[in-house]
Amino acid sequence: MSAGTLTLTNNSASVVGNGTSFTTELTAADFIVVTVGGVSYTLPVKTVDSTTALTLVSNYTGPTQSGAAWYAVPRVAMNLVTAALVAQSAEALRGLNYDKQNWQQIFSGTGTATIKLPDGSAFTGPTWNSFTTALNSKADKVDGAVPLSQGGTGAPTVAGARTNLGLGDSAVRNVGTAAGTVAAGDDSRIVNSLRKDQAGTMSQPIYSNFLSANGFMLEKNSTAVSQSGSNYYNRFARVFSRFSDASFEIDHFESPGNYYAARIIVYSSYQNSQLASFEMRHTGIGVSQGGWQTFSDRRIKTNLVPVEKPLEKMKLIRGYTWDRLDSAPSGRGFIAQEVAKAFPEAVSVGGSATLKTGEKIDDILTPDTYGVAAALHHEAILALMDKIEALTTRVDKIEGGSVTIHPGS
């Protein structure tokens, strides 16, 4: 911004400055730029009369204004602006001429047209004539049959179109559940069925030759089953396999108010006579009519060593009754830590339990109660029998007078 301010008078070529130095900032043919009422005026200078007075080339056409700020624009700068404006205008006109030529080629040319851009680059594209020529060569979509190769059916009739497209008779059937219709994707018969590799809800039993030998059934939510005339349990689900002379069942059931259990049942035939039942109850107890047996054949064992010092080991292990800190019922037996003192190899580590307080106990110790009790008690009894026999022999000798009893002996 130049020094001082200007006073401009409407329809006058005289400009008066206040605090200006026109003689040092301007020469004839320079320009001053001033903004009055939001409008910028670029005014050419005719003569510089003094440091505070100059004359314009033409009268000022704006409103009278005093104290206006101003800028001095040298003639050289204005010439550069004018030259740039001429160059830009020429470039714009060149672009308009290109546009007219380009559109003339597109509308009146054939084949492809070369489109020129204002920066001198060019590219080619189809003309309007090439579009109409291509459309005229397309198949008639109104009369006749559109070939398959051009996206049609190759036939003027519906039946012929289905044949050419390889469509079966289901293409003309309506969606429904009655005979002669096709099923929709949300048909309940499909949605509610069990599908391969997908989850499904089973509402009816699944049978496979169930009424004959080698039959199979998968069933859920069975009704309450009675036994001996009274309600015995509610069966939730079962798998039943039938053979000619025996049947097998795996089920999940509830004894109302008592317990839940998973069970394996063996029948003599089709549920005519129950031969065996094995229950695994939610209390952690296993139940069967017989007993659980393990292999104990000498032929499959080695390093047979009788339990040593059985009477001493008997004192290390006590028999207890207890209440559980978790949800299991009360019980009786050995404590794993005591068994480990006498038979460390008879105690295994594994599993976890959550107490009623919420505390979780990991690495639960589990003793081989049956094996330890059988081996230890039997050997302890044998040891006691030896002691009894020795004492009996001694008593017999005393009563026969063959033994002299000394005081303190």
Image (cartoon, rainbow, N blue to C red):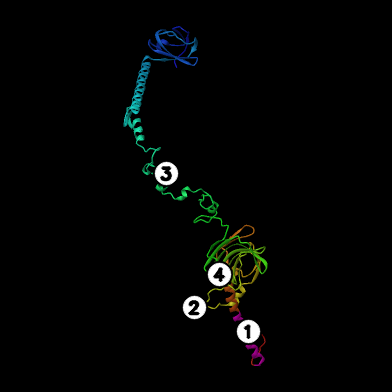
Classify residue 118 by image quadrant.
Answer: top left
Q: Are the residues tagged 3 and 4 within 8 Å (C-beta)?
A: no
The residue tagged 2 is 299
Between 293 and 121, the one lying in front of the other is 121
Q: Nearer the viewer, residue 342 or 33?
A: 33
Discs 1/3, front = 3
Task: Please give the residue where the numbered disc 3 appears in the rendered image.
Answer: 157
Q: Secondary structure at mark 3?
A: loop
Magenta residues, start to end: 381-401
Q: Position of residue 371 (x, y in %)?
A: 57, 73
Q: Earlier in the sequence, mark 2 or mark 4?
A: 4
Specify the quadrant of the image occupied by residue 293: bottom right
**Which numbered mark, 2 or 4, is in the foreground of this view?**
4
Residue receiving disc 4: 247
**Secondary structure type for disc 4:** strand
Residue type, mark 2 in image: Arg
In three-dimensional space, the C-alpha distance between marks 2 and 3, rounded to whole angstroms, equals 85 Å
Asked if labels 1 and 2 touch by Cβ distance under 8 angstroms, the answer is no
Q: Secondary structure at mark 2?
A: helix
- The percent coordinates of residue 215 (x first, y second) are 53, 66
Q: The residue under label 4 is which amino acid type?
A: Ser
